[in-house]
Amino acid sequence: MSKISQTPTGIPASDIPHQLSLGPLEQEVLGILWERQPISVREVQEIILADPYRELTAASITTVLQRLAKKGWVSRQKERGVFLWQALISRDRAQALQAEDRLQQFLSIGSNPEVVAAFADRLDSASLDQLERLTAQIKLARQAREGGSCT
């Protein structure tokens, strides 16, 4: 049996959407799915149109859902002649993946001394304290996962 490839935070690669970036409407529709799923296009439209200042056709919502499916965020299943859509990963897992992606992007530019200097000049002591607490939490989580000491 082959070992499942994982992200640095331990999320199996098979659970990661093909594309993490989402536009505002994609985020909104995905949020609706997390609240009420499985759900039809018409139901998504009713929720969005509950705001009297919004206009969005069922065709537009279908396009958004198809884009989310292509990116690996959602799937659909036909029941009684109607496609029902559902998210493939939880909101918590999605937030973890997106946070990890942003962190990796940040770390990839972190070796540039000019970027580090500009970043350091803008951080207040509360932000530095928060980064130190986050580092400590990461070390504790690794230590717990690995069952050894983490220095």
Image (cartoon, helix red, strand yellow):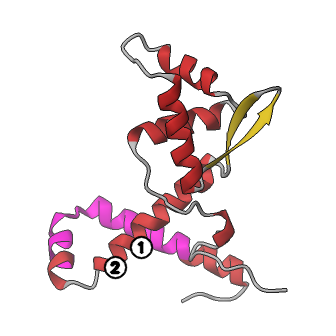
Kindly report the distance in space between the C-alpha atoms of the residues bearing marks 2 and 1. 6 Å
Viewed as shown, does residue 126 lie left or right of 17?
left
Q: Nearer the viewer, residue 32 or 133?
A: 32
Question: Where does the magenta region start and end?
Answer: 116-138
Left or right position of 9 against 148: left
Residue identifier under label 1: 104
Residue 119 falls in image quadrant:
bottom left
The answer to if 134 sits in the magenta stretch is: yes
Q: Assess disc 2: are there few (<14), some (14-19) or many (≥20) residues with their C-alpha within 10 Å of its C-alpha.
A: few
Callout 1 environment at 10 Å: few (<14), some (14 to 19), or many (20+)? few
Secondary structure of residue under mark 2? helix
Magenta highlight on residue 126: yes
Dot 1: what SS? helix
Residue sticking out furthest to the top? 52
Q: Nearer the viewer, residue 45 or 34?
A: 45
Q: Amino acid at mark 2?
A: Ser
Find disc 2 in the rendering and name its residue: 108
Quadrant assignment for the C terminus: bottom right
Percent coordinates x, y for residue 132 in the rendering: 40, 71
